[in-house]
């Protein structure tokens, strides 16, 4: 099984900050990777698909990069609604796997 | 409106069974791979099962042999039959649509782009 490891597990930041999360796969997943935002009591929302493409309707302050085993999600200028937990997920091979998540908290 | 609505969650004793349903609307259900994903309280997202358009099914080791995913395209419905339930299966269960697109002879993963609101399964005596 492909293990997805996210870092950090949690981060505190302020509105307007730039933050970057990382996701590392235990073996190459090519670009078959998506990033999700998840808020309590809500369904997860896909932000980035195919590693670096912005989902329709997602603000351009979100961006993704990487391929193979190393990926990043960047939020260029944090907004109040961005405080949530973020997950990466690989779809290169079954079983699909999610990272353990990065919780973004308000400083 | 593109929508997924789960149902069937509830309280079940350890060793018991439960069948979750997911009703799809607003898109051509038969054209998409479908998934179940769960989240236990205080934990992260865990992929539970997938069924391809052709009917092939996939599971992680944690549920293989106990859970069965199925679909009924004529009813735009997805199901998850859960047997031999354990306390560790307690979670909110989401159904989700997965999208792949073929571009220049390469398939690209567009992610699980539509999710239901979730249904809660509690396994407890």
Image: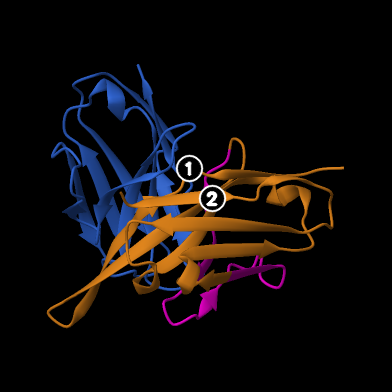
Name the disc covering residue B55, or none: none
Q: How many labels does the image show?
A: 2
Work out whether B115 lies above or below A41.
Answer: below
For disc 1, the marked residue is B117
Magenta stretch: residue B122 in it?
Answer: no
Colour applied to chain A: blue
Work out whether A2 lies above or below B87.
Answer: below
> Percent x, y for residue B3?
38, 50
Q: Residue furthest front?
A: B74
Instruction: Residue at 38%, 31% (x, y): give it.
Output: A84
> Percent x, y for residue B124?
81, 43
10 Å neighbourhood of mark 2: few (<14), some, or many (≥20)?
Answer: many
> Percent x, y for residue B118?
53, 44
- Could you tell me how far apart the alpha carbons at marks 2 and 1 are, in whole angstroms? 7 Å
What quarter of the picture does the C terminus of chain B occupy? top right
In magenta, the rendered stretch is B43-69
Residue B61 appearing in the image: yes
Q: Mark 2 lies on which chain?
A: B
Upstream in the sequence, badge 2 or badge 1? Answer: 2
Q: Is residue A19 left or right of residue A100?
A: left
The answer to which image quadrant residue B83 occupies is: bottom right
Instruction: Residue at 77%, 59% (x, y): give it.
Output: B17
Magenta stretch: residue B61 in it?
Answer: yes
Instruction: Residue at 54%, 74% (x, y): give it.
Output: B58
Q: In this view, does B25 lie to the left or right of B104?
A: right
Same chain for marks 2 and 1?
yes
Q: Is residue B34 left or right of residue B17?
A: left
> Percent x, y for residue B6?
54, 50
Work out whether A47 lies above or below B78.
Answer: above
For disc 2, the marked residue is B6
10 Å neighbourhood of mark 1: few (<14), some, or many (≥20)?
Answer: some
């Amino acid at each position: 099984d492909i293990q997805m490891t996210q870092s950090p597990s949690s981060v505190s930041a302020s509105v307007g900050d730039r933050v970057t999360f990382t996701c590392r796969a235990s073996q190459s997943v090519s670009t078959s990777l998506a990033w999700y935002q998840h808020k309590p009591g809500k369904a997860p929302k896909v932000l980035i698909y195919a590693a670096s493409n912005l989902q329709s309707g997602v603000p351009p302050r979100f961006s993704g990069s990487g391929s193979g085993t190393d990926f990043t999600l960047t939020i260029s200028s944090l907004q109040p609604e961005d405080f949530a937990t973020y997950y990466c997920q690989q779809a290169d091979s079954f079983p699909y796997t999610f990272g353990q998540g990065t919780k973004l908290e308000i400083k | 409106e593109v929508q997924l609505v789960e149902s069937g969650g509830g309280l079940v004793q350890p060793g018991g069974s439960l069948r979750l349903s997911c009703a799809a609307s607003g898109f051509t259900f038969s054209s998409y791979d479908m998934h179940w994903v769960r989240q236990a309280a205080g934990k992260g997202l865990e992929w539970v099962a997938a069924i391809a358009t052709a009917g092939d099914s996939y599971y992680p080791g944690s549920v293989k042999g106990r859970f069965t995913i199925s679909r009924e395209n004529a009813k735009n419905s997805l199901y998850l039959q859960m047997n031999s339930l354990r306390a560790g299966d307690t979670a909110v269960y989401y159904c989700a649509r997965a999208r792949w697109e073929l571009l220049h002879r390469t398939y690209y993963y567009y992610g699980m782009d539509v999710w239901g609101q979730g249904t809660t399964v509690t396994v407890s005596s």
